[in-house]
Image: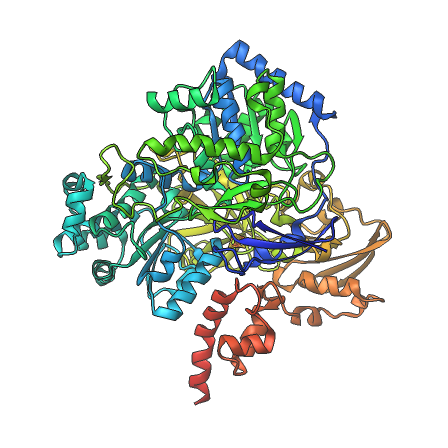
Amino acid sequence: MHSKDTTCPYCGVGCGVTAQTDGRRLIAVEGNSRHPANRGRLCVKGANLAATMVNDGRLLRPVVDGREVDWRTATDEVAARLRAVVDVNGADAVAFYLSGQLLTEDYYVANKLIKGYIGTANVDTNSRLCMASAVAAHKRAFGEDVVPCDYSDLESADLIILCGSNTAWAHPIVYQRIVAAREARGTRVVVIDPRRTTTCDIADQHLAIRPGTDAALFNGLLAYVAANGALDHDFVERHTEGFAAARAANRLSPEAVATLTDLDLHQVLSFYAAFADTQATVTLFSQGVNQAANGTDRANAIINCHLATGRIGIAGAGPFSITGQPNAMGGREVGGLANQLAAHMDFDETCWTTVSNFWGAPNLARQPGLKAVDMFDAIHDGRIKALWVMGTNPAVSLPNTPKVRAALARCETVIVSDCVAQTDTTAFADVLLPAQGWGEKDGTVTNSERRISRQRRLLPAVGEARPDWQIICDVAISMGFADAFAFTAAHEIFAEHVDLSATNKATNRLFDLSFLKGLSARDYADLEPVSWPPQERPYAQRLFSTPSGRARFVPTAHREALQQPCPAYPLILNSGRFRDQWHTMTRTGSAAKLFLHSCEPTLQIHPRDAASRNIINGDLVAVRSAVGEVRLIADVCDNVRAGNVFAPIHWNDRFASMAVVGSLFESAADPISGQPESKHAAVQCRAIKHLTWARLLYPAELDLDRLNGCVALRYWAVSPGQDRAAFQYEFALANSEAMAELIELGDALCFQAGSQLRLLGEHSGRPWLLFTDDQRERLPPFSHLQHQLDADVPDWQKLSVRSVVRRDQSPVVCTCFEVTRSRIEQAILAGHDDLPALGRELKCGTNCGSCVPELNELLARLAVPAAVAAR
Ligand code: SF4
């Protein structure tokens, strides 16, 4: 057995992972107790990494125009196609679309090739979708994209404001650190979010603002601190500029803020007073702030308040943008965004000359390229003719996916490097290049607190998969740039990246990794997590990265969202993450356990909006916007405001028939950051009634194209069953006769009981089970079907409908020990009325801790009433 330290490939928390392998397989993972980000903890996604290391569905060999070829042929072909487009249409007809999943070394050479050698800055990344507004705000305020906080600040803060962040689900280990700090020192927590999320479990105050009014709330806060003696005059005077203009632009009274945000005045005043009175305040913000048409202004409105109170560059205080992806920050460091050059440099003459000389680049791009949304528009209208997508799935994740897919279909040359063979994007590829996945590749990532950690190779690569950096270098060499891309290992690229960053030494820029200069291959292999700048926290000396050395206030105005509701589309759609899934499921979709918490795409809708549309819990709902439609299962709850609905971003066309939520958003973006407005679309909702529902446990994946050809099919969703030995399908059909159309029944045994149909059949010597019913809630849960198939002699034929209905249908709350909500509720009502007692009784909450907020919610709802009733 071998043990190696590496880094989790999911969110921007960047947890350290210790992996055990037998040389061929990943046997187990656990949190690395020495890693400063997580100190041994892992959330449910990290804890299930081993389950995602499956070889099914991997892209194994290069493919050109549908034909498997060797690597030499593939790289020469890519080089020739890119060269041909440049020769005929110019460099700006080429674009790269990268991913926050790439390692820093991959990002570095991709950026170097396209900007330095192909000669265009048309290189952007899916990180544009999650934190570009924060980047733009940092640059406006500090003169450089620097996150001024680290996680330890959360442990020394007295007030933590979580704005637009469902931290409990999206950044679980940061959340757990906040929970621990709160227990230890009574930290006050304010959650600002239109939705009541699981994060509200620890909120002393939840401000359920009207969507899109974050800037108004913080603009009003700036006015409040100025009017109520909370300004740090000395800091503002000596270390900032532009206060008067920002103040003049922000004269909102608390009353006006209350009206705009739809909060009670006392809520606004209470929040403002808490901020004004608490020096050690961290404002942690995420996608709810960034993914807006005024996302940059929102982030600057937050930063303004910290500058006004001097709460930056000191322990326990600061505006803290937290990234969604494992290496969004690394991508920012090497210039993976279209509007950056490299090493935090811009396109001004001095920076351009520095980078051009350093790279010896004959052809360095002179100006910023097209950002993600504009890039795909340019592909759509034919200005960009060759696109190379690396490690991401824009056909699902970008807004207005119908247009994105049309653009991909029109593009003359689409190259996709990925570790997965079939994604919604690989379907459009002319050239497919097999990339190594997590656990196979080697390099570095930088997390949300600027900490660089190693991702280490754990296992041999599958098939002929190669590291992304090597694929890029091979293409560059084939294009004639051998001298600049003669890297033979990731550490050589890292060394060049370090050397380039060291040119910042003579400037105000903080990004300077020269303390890592001269690392040998051995040093790099053994590199422990390290953050920059190495000596002290950013801006501890009150010297910012601007030409004047002063931080800049930015006048920010409240603006309404671009995609406004109207009579035809009266509801506001918000989108976000579920607890146990990641992005477009290309990785987490392999792990059966990660579907236990939520196995299908749902739509949270307020009871009032549901009632007015005759929608009940579990109904199939058609959600339409001006640009697209999805079909989701209704989750009627008051976690969303009336007039708002919420849907998860994860489901792609491999896992559900029509659930790509990006298809509902228009191509609206922040004009400064280019970040799409992914939290605010105008939609209508309608229940699809009179359906026959079916649940099928099948020992193989069905041909989904064939399913989509079934005219009576209204909906399907699939998830892997236990150990991926079977697949769980849920269907909704317009009529029961269509069932025969749907699957090959063969010699299936068929039993009818009331309105229920039960079928038992065989596929390749392995049984399958299917239940249908005109009432979805009467279908047995998949766990029950599995139980029947697992029985030596299936006794399912003896089951009465009543016994099926009695089975536990409630969702799994604790994924680690597969504990359902109803078991937890029963335990609470039986007197296990706190977390330790529940843990002793059911083990729930005793492993990764991801379910603890939901356990607390249930305890809060049930334990106190039960105790009162008992008295
Ligand atoms: Fe991975 Fe979870 Fe840590 Fe994020 S919080 S890095 S998903 S283990």
Tell me, yes or no, if residue 343 can be seen here: no
Side of 538 where 860 appears, left or right: right
Residue 409 in view here: yes
Image location (x, y in percent) of residue 423: 63, 37
Foreground residue, 78 or 89?
Answer: 78
Residue that protrudes farthest toward the top in the picture:
88
**Residue in the picture at 48% in, 77% down:** 834
- Residue 191 versus residue 118 in the image, above or below: below
Q: How many marks?
A: 0
Q: Is residue 524 left or right of residue 770?
A: left
Residue at left offset 55%, top offset 45%: 454
At 39% from the left edge and 33% from the top edge, which residue is drawn?
344
- Whole-percent x, y for residue 5 in the image: 60, 52
In the figure, is residue 37 to the left or right of 185?
A: right
Q: Quadrant of the N terminus?
A: bottom right
Q: Is residue 311 above or below residue 848?
A: above
Q: Position of residue 354 (x, y in %)?
A: 39, 23
Residue at (68%, 23%) from the top-left corner? Answer: 74
Quadrant location of the C terminus in the rendered image: bottom left
> Dividing the picture into quarters, in which one does residue 767 lie?
bottom right
